[in-house]
Image (tube, grey):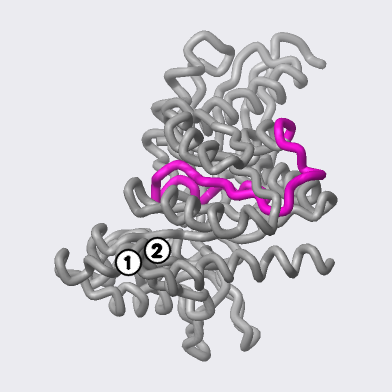
Amino acid sequence: MHELSLACEILEQVIATATAHGASEVKHVTLQMGRLTHTNPEQLSFCFKAIADDSIAKDADFVVEMMPPSLECECGYTGTVDEKQIRESSELKSELLAYVAAMKCPICGEQARITGGRELIIKSIEIETENEN
Amino acid sequence: MLMHVINMGHDVYKANDKLAEKNRKKLDKHQVFSINVMGAIGSGKTTLIEEAIQHLKEKYKIAVIAGDVIAEMDASRFRKLGVPTIPLNTGKECHLDAKLVEKALDEIDLENTDLLIIENVGNLICPVDFKLGEHLRVVIVSVTEGDDIILKHPMIFKTAELAIINKVDIAHAVDVNAEKMRDDILSLNPDVPVILTSKHDWESLETWISFIELGLLKTQSN
C-alpha cells in the first residue's frame, strides 16, 4: 500500500505549481498512469481526496488516464501492446499478467524490452485564479 | 475568476529514478558495489544475506541497509556479524525508495565500504517500481511460496538481474517443482541468471556468494 505516499507527493507538486500560478482553487488534476505500475488508481484517488481535505485542491476532480505498455525489440520492432486483444483474451487471468504475457515481439517472437507503461505522470491541472496575473 | 490549464508532465516515478541515479553516482564515486535484495516475507532474504556477509567479511568491507516495517530486528542480526548496519524503518510503507536510501547513505562511511547490501521490505509487488541506485537487483523466492508465485508477480522477475529460488531442499515436502519455478522465471526474463539455493547446501550458497564477488571484482577493476 504505497498509494498514500504517492498521493502526498502528487499533492505537494500540485499545490506548489498551483500556488506559483496564483491559484485560489485547483479544479482538476489529470494523471497518466502506466498499466505496469503497481499502483491502484481508485486507491490513489481516495488517498488524494483524503489528504487534500484542507488544501486548495479539496474539491478537485481527480482523473487517472491509463497508459498501455510500449515495447521495443532487438529485431527493430517498436510498438504498443494491443489493449483490445488482451481484454478479449479469456485465458489471461490478471490484467497485469496479461500485459506481461503479451510482451513477446509480434514480429520475431522474442521477449521484447519494456520502454513504457511504468509512468505516473501529473499531466496537467486546471486552476482558478482570483485576479489576472 | 479565471480558469487556467497548466501542463505539468511531472513523473513521480521518474523523480525517484533521478534520485536513484544520484545515489548510484555517489556509490560509483566511492567504488561501492551495491545490491538490492527483494523478495517476499519469509523467502530467506536475511538468511542468505547473513551467509554472504559471513563469507565475504574477511575480504571486503561490508555495510548493510536493513529496510523493514520494523527494521531493528534484522539490523541486529547483521550487527552481530560485525558489519555496520543502518536500519530503515518504513513504518507502514511497503518498500524502500531512493529518498530513504539517500538519507541512509549519509550515515555510511562509503570510503571504507566495498559492498553495500540493501535488504528491501518483504514484498513482491511494491519494491518493483522504486529504483534505489543499486548495481544489482536480486529477487529471492522460496519454494514454500508455491510454484505459481512467479507468474502471479511477473514484474519483479521481469526486472530482476539475479533470481534465487531458495529452500529447494524442502521442495518435495511442500509439493513444489523448483524446476518449473526456474522455467517460469526464464519465460519472463530469458537472460537472467537463476540460482537454486538451500541453507543446508554449501555449494549452492557458494554460487550466490560468488555472484556477489564477481560484481565486487568488476567494480574494483573500474
Specify the label residue B179 is tagged with: none
Residue B162 position, x and y percent, is 52, 67
Task: For the C terminus of chain B, give its image quadrant.
Answer: bottom right
Task: For the N terminus of chain B, give its image quadrant.
Answer: top right
- Dividing the picture into quadrants, the one containing residue B137 is bottom right
Amino acid at dot 2: Pro
Q: Which residue appears farthest toward the bottom when viewing the image?
A: A108
Q: Which residues are magenta?
A: B106-133
- Foreground residue, A19 or B187? B187
Q: Residue at x 56, y 59 (%)?
A: B55
Amino acid at dot 1: Leu
**Gap in Å between the C-alphas at discs 2 and 1?**
5 Å
Q: Judging from the image, what secondary structure is the residue with disc 2 in?
A: helix
B122 is within the stretch colored magenta: yes
Q: Residue at x 56, y 12 (%)?
A: A55
Residue under label 1, please give it: B151
- Foreground residue, A59 or A70? A70
Q: Eyeballing the image, is B144 above or below B112?
A: below
Q: Mark 1, chain letter?
A: B
Specify the label residue B154 is tagged with: 2
Residue B14 position, x and y percent, is 66, 47
Q: Is residue B14 visible?
A: yes
Tell me whether circle 2 and circle 1 mark residues in contact (CB < 8 Å): yes
Q: Mark 2, chain letter?
A: B
Residue B188 position, x and y percent, is 43, 73
Q: How many residues crowd around disc 2 within 10 Å: few (fewer than 14), some, or many (20 or more)?
A: many
A8 is within the stretch colored magenta: no
Q: How many residues crowd around disc 1 within 10 Å: few (fewer than 14), some, or many (20 or more)?
A: some
Q: Judging from the image, what secondary structure is the residue with disc 1 in?
A: helix
Q: Residue at x 51, y 47 (%)?
A: A33
The mark tally for this picture is 2
Q: Which residue appears farthest toward the front when viewing the image?
A: B58
